[in-house]
Image: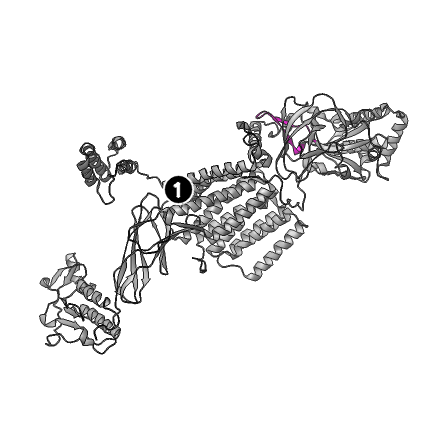
Amino acid sequence: MRPRQPEPLPVLLRRSRIYVLPTATGLFFGLLLGTMGLGALNFNNNPALLLALLLAGAAQASLIAAHMQLSGLRLLAVSADPVAAGEDLRLKIALDTVDARIRRGLRVAAAGDALHTTLDSHGTTVELHLPTQRRGWLALPRLELGTVQPLGLARAWSYVWPNQSVLVYPAPEAQAPPLPAPAGGKGRPRPARAGDDVHHLRNYRAGDTPRSVAWKASARRDVLLVREYEQQLSGELVLDWQATHGLPHEQRIRRLARWVDDAEREGRRYGLRLPGQPVIAMGLGALQRHRCLRALALLPGEPAHG
Amino acid sequence: MAERTPSPPMQATARRHVLLATATCLMPLLLQLPPELGWGFGVAAVLVAAASWRRPLQAVFRILLGIGVLLAVVAVSPGIGRDTACALLAGMLALKPSETMTLRDGRSLVGFALFAPFATFLLDQGPLSLALALAAVLLALLALQCLARDEGEVRVADGPRWWSGSTGVLRLLALGLPLALAAFWLFPRLPSPLWGLPERALAKPGLSDNMTPGGFLDLMTDDSPAARVQFFGAEPRPQDMYWRGPVLWNFDGRAWTQAHWLQPAPAAPMRPAGPGWDYQLDLEPTESRQMIVLDLPTAVPANAHVSIDFSTWSDTPLNNVSRWRMRSAPPAAAEPDLHPMLRDRALRLPRGFNPRTLALGRQWRREAGRDATGVADARIADRALTWIRRDFAYTLKVPLAGRNEVDDFLFDRKQGYCEHFSSAFVVLMRASGVPARVVTGFAGGYRNPIGGYWLVLNSDAHAWAEVWLPRRGWVRVDPTAAVAPERVYDTLADRQPGRIGAFDGLVPMFNAGDWLRRGWNDFVLGFNAQRQQDLLKPFGLGKLKGQHLILLFALLAGLALAWMAWLIARGERERDPLLRAWHRLDARYRRLGRGRAQHEPAQAWAERVAADQPRAGEHLAILSRRFSDARYAPQPAELQGLLRDLGRHRP
C-alpha cells in the first residue's frame, strides 16, 4: 500500500507496504534462466536443468532477501534545521530496525537526492539535501527507502510520507542597505569588542556563533569561552516593517531577514515589528534570530496590510 | 525508477570478480571444444582481458577479433552443428571482456557467461564439467553480489571480502536448494522433445556405425564407461557377454558398413536356448539411436525396437544417460530361414580386392563340397578357426592398411586385433560361399563388487563374426577369442579398471567412484518423464498423472518458499551468548506485555516489573544487576552460571 497521505512517524515497514520487482538485470536473468530451463526440459538435459534451477532458486531467495532487507526497518523521525530559501535543506532521517538483521546498501531517496547507508538495530541517521524555493512551511516530500541487495536482481522499495513540515526562512536580500539607525536615534553604538579580559568572557552556550568564540582564551583554559560583548542599551535596534516602505512585499521580507542576519553578525540587540503581530522583544543570539526569521517566514503572502 | 542514467564504472574488485566468474564459466566449455579451439580461445580471453583492463579495446579491434573467432571456428569444425554453435559462443565470450567497463556491462557479461556451462552440458555431462559448472555458478553469484554491493556503496570492513561474500552467496544457494530440487523432481517433464537437439558437426568418439581399418584403436584405449548393467537373477558367463551393437553387412574392400534399409524390418524369428537373462541397462549417451544389447535380445521396451539383424534401435537419439529393462537369451536358432535377398547380401564381396583370400575360399569350398544340411559350411568355418588359432597372434601394433588388407593379414602379417580377425574371417567365409556378417559391440565387462553391477567400458569394444548355417541360423563365431580369449573377456588381472600396472591399491577407490557415478546417473542424469511418473511407486502409489505432479510440486514449492522466508526473516544470530540469553529473557516478558522498552536500562526495567509482579520482579532485579555487571566488567568464571540462571528464569 502506497501512502496516499502523510502519516505520523515513526513508521515501521511491514510486508503490506513493500514492493518488490525485478531490476532490469533481474529481468535479463529471468529471460536467461527461462531459456536455459526450457532448453534443458526439451532435451531432458538434467545437469543443465539442475544448473538453471539452482540459479533460479538463488535468485528467488535473493528476491525474498531483498524484501527482508526492508521489512522490519523503522523510520523513527525526520528533522531539519531551517535554512534560507534557495539553500539546500539538510534533512536528517533517523532509522533503526526492530530485529537483529543488518541492512546493507539501503538507499534513502527524496526529491532527487539519494544516498546509501548500512545499519543494524542500533540505528543510524542519514542526511539528505532537499532543495528549497519558498519561505514558509515546507511539507516534506515522500521518502523512498529501497535496496537492490543482495544480488542486484530485485529491487525492494517502500515509501514513507511523514506528515511533517520544516521551516524555510526567507532568503536574505543580497544587496541591502546597512542597518537602519537605532530606534533611540543616538547614533551608532561604538563597537563593543572589549578584549579578552576574563570578566568579559563566559562559557560557550549552544547557539553562540563561532565568530564570538575567544579561541586563544579557550585554548588556555581548555574550555570553550565566548566573548561577552558589552551590551549597550543605546545600541538597541528595532527592525520595523514600516522602514522598508515602498519596496515590493517579498523584498521587504528579504531585507528584514538580511538585517536580522546583519544585526546578529554585529552583535547588536534587536527587535522586530511586523504588521498585525506583537512586537518581538529585544534580544540577541540564535533563539532571537530564529524567532524573528520564523515570524518573517510565516508572514502571509501578498500585502495584507498596505 | 526506470530513468536511464549512465551506469557507474566497475571498481577493480568487482571487475576481478566478474572476470574470474567468466573464466570459470568458460573453462568447462573450452575443455569440450577441439583442443586447438579450446586453447586458442583460452589464450585469447586472457590477452583480451589484460589488454582492455584500463580502457575498452577500439571498435575496429573488436570487430577484427570477432571475425577471427568466426574464421577459427569455421576452419576447425566446418559445418553447422551443436558443437560449432558452442565453439562460437565460447569465442564470443572470450572477447566480451574487451568492452566491459560499467556495472551494467559487468552484469550482462556474467549473465551471458552462464550460458557457457549450459552449452557444456549439451556436449558432455561428465563429473568434471559438473564440478566446474558448480564452481562457475558460485563465482557468478559472487560477482553479482559484488556488483550489487558496489551499487549500494557497501563497505565490508570485517574479515576478508571474498569470505564474507561467499557465505552470503552460499546461504542464498542453500535457501534456494529445496525449491530447485522440488522443481527438478516434480516439475512435469516433457515425454518427448518439442524440437530435436541439433546434431554435432564433429562426431563424438564412441562405437561407430561402420568399421574402418584402425577405427577401433581410439575406442580400445578409452577407459570411459559405455554402459552399466544390473542383472536380475542369472548372470551370463563372461564368454556369453557379447553386447551387440551395429551389424555390418556391406564391405567395399576397405570399410564395413551397416545396411540401413534393413533397420525398419522387424526382428527375425528366433528360438531361445534356455531361459535367458533379465537385466537393466544404463547406456551412456552416444548421440545416435543405435543401442547395445546382450546377444540376442528377446524383449525390449516399447520405445525401442529390434531390427531383422537383431541390432537394436531406440526411438530417439541417446543424448542422455538412459535406462532400459531388457531380456536376452542365447539362440538355439536365429533366423533359420534366410531370405534369398539377405543371403545374397551376406555373400557379396567387392570385385578386385583380396584375390588370394577369394582363391583360398573357393579352394576350401571345392574340398568341403556342398550339402543342404550345412555340414560342409560348418566344416569350413571350423577349418578357418583352427587355422587362425594355430597360426595367428593378437597385437594392437598394426601397420597402416594396404589395398588388399585381408590378404595382407591372412597370408603375411598374421597379427592383428578384433577388427582384422572379424573382417578377414567374414571375407574368407563369403569367399567360400558361407553367408556371414560382422557384428560390432562390446565383449565382457567388469563386475563392480560395490553395487554388484557390471561395467562395460569403451575399451571393451569388440568386433566378431556371424555365419549363417542351415537350420541353426546365425551362429556367433569369434575368431579373436580363438586366439586371445583373455583379451576379449577381460580376464587379465592387469586390465582391471583402476589398476595402474601391478598396483591395485586404487581399485576400491575406482569401484566406489563408479558406484557413486552410477547413483548420480540414476538419480539425476537419467531422470526423465517416464521415471518421474514412477517416482512414488516405492511408496505404494501408482503412476503420477500430470495434475497430480503439478499439485505435489505446488505443495512442495510452497513449503520451500515459506521455509526460505522464515529463514531469511529469522535474522542474523546474536553472537554474544550473554546478549542472546538476555534477549530471550526479554522476549518471555514481552509475551506478557512487560517487555523492556528500548530506552529503558536493565535495572529500571526490573524495578518496573517488580512493581507489578513482586515475586518474579525481585529475582529479575538480581538478574539484571548481575547482567549489568557482566556487561560492564566481564567475569568469565561467572558467565556460565549467569547464562544458566537467565535461561531458567520465568516471569
Q: Is residue A211 visible?
A: no
Horizontal placement of B151 versus B218: left or right?
Answer: left
Q: Is residue A278 magenta?
A: no
Q: Nearer the viewer, residue B640 or B606?
A: B606
Query: How many labels, in total?
Result: 1
Under tag 1, what secondary structure? helix
Q: Position of residue A187 (x, y in %)?
A: 12, 77
In what quadrant of the picture does the C terminus of chain A appear? bottom left
Residue denoted by label 1: B568
Outermost bottom residue = A246
**Which of the colour schemes (rainbow, by chain, secondary structure, one colour) is used?**
one colour
Tell me which corner region of the image, top left, top right, bottom left or bottom right, holds residue B243. Answer: top right
Q: Bin the neighbour count of mark 1 within 10 Å (Cα to Cα): few under 14, some 14-19, many 20 and up.
A: many
Q: Is residue B447 magenta?
A: yes
- Looking at the image, is B141 positioned above or below residue A215? above
Q: Position of residue B350 (x, y in %)?
A: 84, 39
Q: Position of residue B409 (x, y in %)?
A: 80, 34
Horizontal placement of B203 versus B59: left or right?
Answer: right
Q: Is residue A86 visible?
A: yes
Q: Chain of mark 1?
A: B
- Looking at the image, is B440 positioned above or below residue B62? above
Tell me which corner region of the image, top left, top right, bottom left or bottom right, holds residue B643. Answer: top left
- Looking at the image, is A289 positioned above or below residue B86? below
Horizontal placement of B84 versus A168: left or right?
Answer: right
Q: Residue at x 22, y 65 (%)?
A: A294
Q: Nearer the viewer, residue B331 or B16?
A: B331
Q: Looking at numbered disc 1 in the image, what kind of residue is underneath it?
A: Ile
Range of the magenta residues? B442-459
Q: Nearer the viewer, residue A257 or B411?
A: A257
